[in-house]
Amino acid sequence: MADRTVDQLKGPVLIELCLLLCDFLGDLDLGVKLDGLTDDDLYQNITFAASLQHSGRDFTARPAPELDHIAAAVLRRLSTGALGDTTLRSPQARYATDATLWTVRVADGPESTTAPDKPVGALWTSSVLPDGTSMWQWGELAEFGPDRPPYTVTFDPEGIRLFTIDSPSDYARLVDRYPCSSNGRAQVCWSRAAEDLDAVHLTVRGLLTAQHVPVETSQGTAILTGWDAESTAWLHLPNVFEMTPATA
């Protein structure tokens, strides 16, 4: 399925990443230099690019044809390493004040044109990088400091009803499947999604290509916002789901 982005715009996370990498690595032989970056280093740059939405600069989707070759090189690099893996794997990582688990009860977000399209009440986890670092680590420290310790989350992936957002068209399909229109903005009806799904996983590629990118749906234009990192929103917890303090 072709992506239903408005005029095939590039996401602002991808744009900022391309600009960062061009400054850091230079434009010559960029593909080779990207291959030399570890997944950990590349994802740290992705996290920084995503954080620039709070910098006051223009953080909107746009065509940016001058970055086509860099964006293509980045997406090729993703496809060759662990960052391109779309599988929801155990273990995951989670930052929390304690290891208490609760019965997840998902609600829809506030009716606002600026509210993020994310499930209220979901339990959130992130995947881990090859060195064991949570993909949330840098954003967590920037937002919360050291107050919330990391936990390792283990679960049985068998039978999990999972929806994966790996592209703008994936998000558009999620909105079309569980539509909600609020103040003229199309978004996901998360309470309805929770009737069918256990978890929704935003991949690294999805973060780069789908976040903050307008897509056309049957309900109008929808924009995925507020996720800000590779992450999984759990709408229901599987029978086997345990949290233990992370070990260094």
Image (cartoon, grey):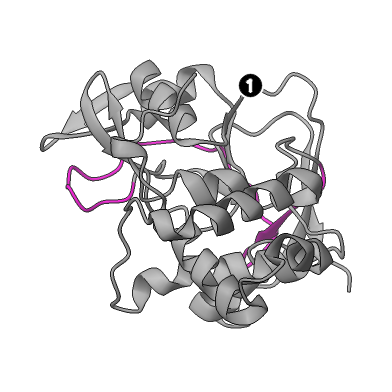
Pick the quarter of the image with the C terminus. Answer: bottom right
Pick whichever, 85 or 94, lies toward us.
85
Residue at 56 percent across and 46 percent down: it is 123
Give the residue drawn at x 43%, y 60%.
66
Secondary element at image label 1? loop
**Percent of width and height locating residue 131:** 87, 65
Instruction: Name which residue lies at 56% across and 80% down.
Output: 23
Q: Tell me: 183 left or right of 91.
A: left
Residue in the foreground of this view, choosing between 42 and 245: 42
In the picture, measured across the screen, residue 105 lies left or right of residue 188, that is right
Task: Say whether residue 99 is visible.
Answer: yes
* Quarter holding residue 222: top left
**In magenta segment, residue 99:** yes
The range drawn in magenta is: 90-116
Residue 125 visible? The answer is no
Q: Is residue 11 magenta-colored? A: no
- Packing grade of label 1 (10 A; few <14, some 14-19, many >=20) is some
Q: What type is the residue that disc 1 sits on?
A: Arg
- Rendering coords of residue 19 (x, y %): 50, 71
Which residue of the protein is positioned furthest toward the left in this rendering? Answer: 183
The majority secondary structure of the magenta stretch comes to loop
Question: On the image, numbered disc 1 is attached to which residue?
Answer: 161
Query: Height in image: 43 above or below 173?
Result: below
Q: Is residue 175 above or below residue 26?
A: above
The image quarter in which residue 188 lies: top left
| Position of residue 65 measured from the top left corner of the image (x, y, whole percent) | 40, 53
